[in-house]
Amino acid sequence: MTAAMTTSRMRAEIGEQPQALRRTIDALLPRMSDVGLLARGTRQVLFIARGSSDNAAVYGRYLVESQVGRLATPAAPSIATTYRRRLDLTGVLAVAISQSGRTEEIVETLEWAADCGARTIAVTNGPGSPLAETAEVALITEAGDEVAVPATKTYTTQLAALSVLALGLGAPVDQTELRRVPDEVERLIAATEASPALEAVVAGLAEVPGAVVSGRGIAFGTALELALKIKEACYLHAMGLSYADLLHGPIAVVDSATPAILVAADEGPTLPGTVALARRVTGAGAHAYGIGGGDGLARACSHALPGPRLPEWVAPLGLIVPGQLVVEALARRLGHDPDVPRGLNKVTQTD
């Protein structure tokens, strides 16, 4: 496989997401009651993850806080694995997320959380993995084997599992909206590849050293994940920021050589701010590339790709997909093999 190929394993796995999501949602929705029973007596959710899984956890955090009304926080694994500090985690539901379930740091941190009094859940694509065996409840995603190093279908199925987690915790949302996701992702893949904006965005990014990727609220995890993919597969500098943080100073880096990629659901309270940011970026003479956000964001951007026709709470399951397609095409445009980014392995071990 070479960088000049017309297709890649990454692109094939992007196309496998509708089926992977259907399998995962069908398998995990019946586990809502298991989540609810385990979570009785807990009041807070602690997410344990690294890399793309950490970006999925950001979605989980906003989903739990905005829809369930529980405090949700990211763990610092080094507290468990390096500082070896015991904390009182009574009343905490610890949720560890790992594609493989074999990252030793994540397994050790979940074991530590249990020893500190937390109830434990694993989200993993690795049935029988150490992480799945460690947790009291394991939500096993059904992504199938993922060969390309950049996570695509394992990431979106993690988001599906976290949606089920929120439902199990009592989120007052309609689970039929989650069941709509696979068909919408299938439509979105076709719509993105048919859009002339795809070539325009790829061409624009191929001419610059980096970009700022921004979203807010439930879309913030999508911005972080897209920035990570641009860095690891395309070797460009990409800064993932909430637009609130972007406006506090880093907006100064957005100029003719540093475009902004803005992501938003087609509805929700963060959409007006995303549209206003797009206008500010283009008004300053820089390019703004939109993903999602409906007609309002599209009109405010230099070029815009369609987003999912989904409610805000599940929109991130589709919102990342146009970004994945941009990254795959951009990597090939730049002469890189998107399947095997340099210096990366499928399973990363940290101390």
Image (spheres, rainbow, N blue to C red):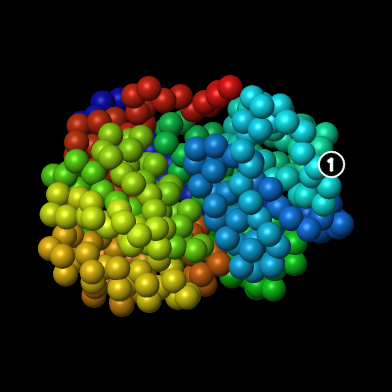
**Does residue 294 sit above or below 291 in this rendering?**
below
Which of these two is toward me, 13 or 348? Answer: 348
In the rendering, at what x and y percent does residue 350 appear? 55, 24
User: Which residue is labeled 1 in the image?
Assistant: 117
Looking at the image, can residue 137 be seen?
no
Q: Secondary structure at mark 1?
A: loop
Identify the residue at horizontal 49%, vertical 63% (top origin).
217
Task: Tell me the residue at 55%/37% (across/down).
Answer: 50
Q: Amino acid at mark 1?
A: Gly
Q: Is residue 42 left or right of residue 8?
A: right
Of residues 73 and 17, which is closer to you in this image? 73
At x 83%, y 34%, the residue is 115
- Badge 1: how crowded within 10 Å, few (<14), some, or many (20+)? some
Image height check: is 62 above or below 112?
A: below
- Give residue 118's quadrant in the image: top right
- Whether residue 127 can be seen here: yes
